């Protein structure tokens, strides 16, 4: 993650995931509600992160007038199912849509869509059977999807990060 706003949001969410282990044993109701809360925040993380990545890209590559218009439209993005993510990336570049589809098909796509579906059901008072283990796995997938999007939009920065990580290991 390169965008400071995304890093901050992720750190906040990481800390809230750690709180689960501190919840009292035997109180399944609290743990169940905490898992739902984490699901809602994870959905927000996807939306917020995608907006931040795209706004940053727009600010770096567009004129002030164009960026003002585009940012207003991007700021309204919500319900970040993968088809909507594909669609918004396609508005910028057909290749981005193709790349994200290729890299997220299967489990990553299913997890992101499940996060949004569960968030929707929770918001409308419906019962969901989301456990901490499930939302933890979904969250990892959401982070992976955001990282993939960053790498697609900023491939030169992704290459530098890989080289830095490789240098640390060796």
Image (cartoon, rainbow, N blue to C red):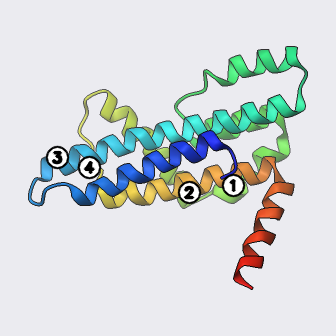
Q: Residues within 10 Å of mark 3 (few under 14, many from 20)?
A: some
> Of circles 2 and 3, which is in front?
3
Mark 1 vs mark 2, CA separation in Å:
11 Å
What residue lies at 56% left-to-right and 57% top-to-bottom? Answer: 108
> Of circles 3 and 1, which is in front?
3
Query: Number of callouts in the render?
Result: 4
What residue lies at 10% left-to-right and 53% top-to-bottom? Answer: 27
* Precedes in sequence: disc 3 or disc 1: 3
Q: Which residue is mark 1?
A: 148
Q: Residues within 10 Å of mark 2 (few under 14, many from 20)?
A: many
Q: Position of residue 49 (x, y in %)?
A: 61, 40
Secondary structure state at the residue bearing disc 4: loop
> Of circles 4 and 3, which is in front?
3
Q: Position of residue 40 (x, y in %)?
A: 39, 38
* Precedes in sequence: disc 4 or disc 3: 3
Q: Position of residue 129 (x, y in %)?
A: 26, 49
- Picture quadrant where residue 102 is located: bottom right
């Amino acid at each position: 993650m390169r965008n400071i706003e995304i890093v901050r949001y992720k750190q906040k969410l990481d800390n809230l995931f750690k709180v689960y282990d501190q919840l009292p044993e035997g109180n399944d109701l609290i743990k169940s509600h905490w898992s739902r809360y984490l699901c809602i925040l994870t959905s927000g993380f996807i939306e917020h992160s995608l907006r931040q990545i795209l706004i940053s890209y727009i600010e770096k590559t567009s004129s002030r007038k164009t960026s003002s218009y585009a940012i207003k439209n991007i700021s309204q993005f919500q319900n970040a199912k993968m088809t909507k993510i594909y669609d918004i990336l396609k508005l910028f570049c057909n290749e981005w849509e193709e790349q994200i589809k290729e890299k997220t098909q299967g489990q990553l796509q299913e997890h992101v869509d499940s996060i949004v579906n569960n968030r929707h059901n929770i918001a409308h008072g419906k019962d969901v059977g989301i456990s901490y283990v499930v939302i933890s796995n979904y969250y990892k997938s959401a982070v992976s999807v955001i990282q993939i999007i960053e790498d697609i939009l900023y491939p030169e920065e992704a290459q530098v990060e890989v080289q830095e990580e490789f240098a640390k290991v060796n």
